[in-house]
Amino acid sequence: MTAQKGKDLLLKLDSDGNGTFVTVAGLRTKTFTVNAETVDITTSESTGRWRELLDAAGTQHARLTGKGIFKSAASDAALRALAFAGTIRAWQIIVPGFGTVAGPFQISTLEFSGQHHAEVAFDITLESAGEITFTALAP
């Protein structure tokens, strides 16, 4: 895979709960993380006192964080409503040259900030709330 433009990493929200995905406008930075918790099964009899882990036993979760500016009242209102209600909604993360990650997420953090001489900005964190799927781009 060759280098990709960071601006092409897109975050899309199922805006109406019926599969109509729209790009959340104005995100300047985005980070997507997949984590798997481990289950330590090390005992006093473990070879060389090395830690042993139980295969495929821990829980998995994904997190997306982003920073940006609101470019429309509609995207501002949609994110604010979901955050205040604690609504779980379908989201898509489009990774250029790689594929699409999709699944239910909940906004766990929505933070607003601003400087006297600049625009109002926001930080958002989404936490996975169910099974996440990955669809690779066709070769």
Image (spheres, rainbow, N blue to C red):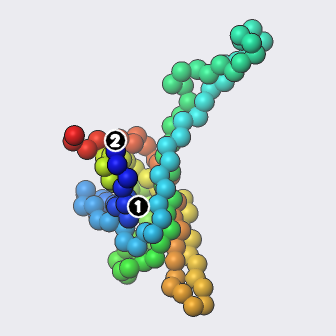
- For badge 1, the amino acid type reads Gly
Q: Comparing marks 1 and 2, which lies closer to the viewer?
A: 1
Residue at image position (57%, 71%) is 111
Mark 1 element type: helix
Q: Position of residue 42 (x, y in %)?
A: 70, 18
Give the CA separation, mark 1 to mark 2.
Answer: 19 Å
- Note whether 46 is above or below 10 in the view shown: above
Of 110 and 70, the residue lying toward us: 70
User: Are the residues tagged 1 and 2 within 8 Å (C-beta)?
Assistant: no
Q: Tell me which residue sits at (25%, 56%) in the image.
A: 19
Residue at image position (54%, 36%) is 36
Q: Residue at x 66, y 24 (%)?
A: 40
Question: Which residue does the numbered mark 1 point to in the structure image?
Answer: 6
Residue 127 vertical position relative to residue 25 in the rendered view, above or below: above
Query: Can you say whether 69 is above or below 45 in the image?
Result: below
> Which residue in the structure is indicated by mark 2?
134
Can residue 84 be seen by looking at this rendering? no
> x, y (%) of residue 75?
37, 74
Looking at the rendered structure, the kind of residue marked 2 is Phe
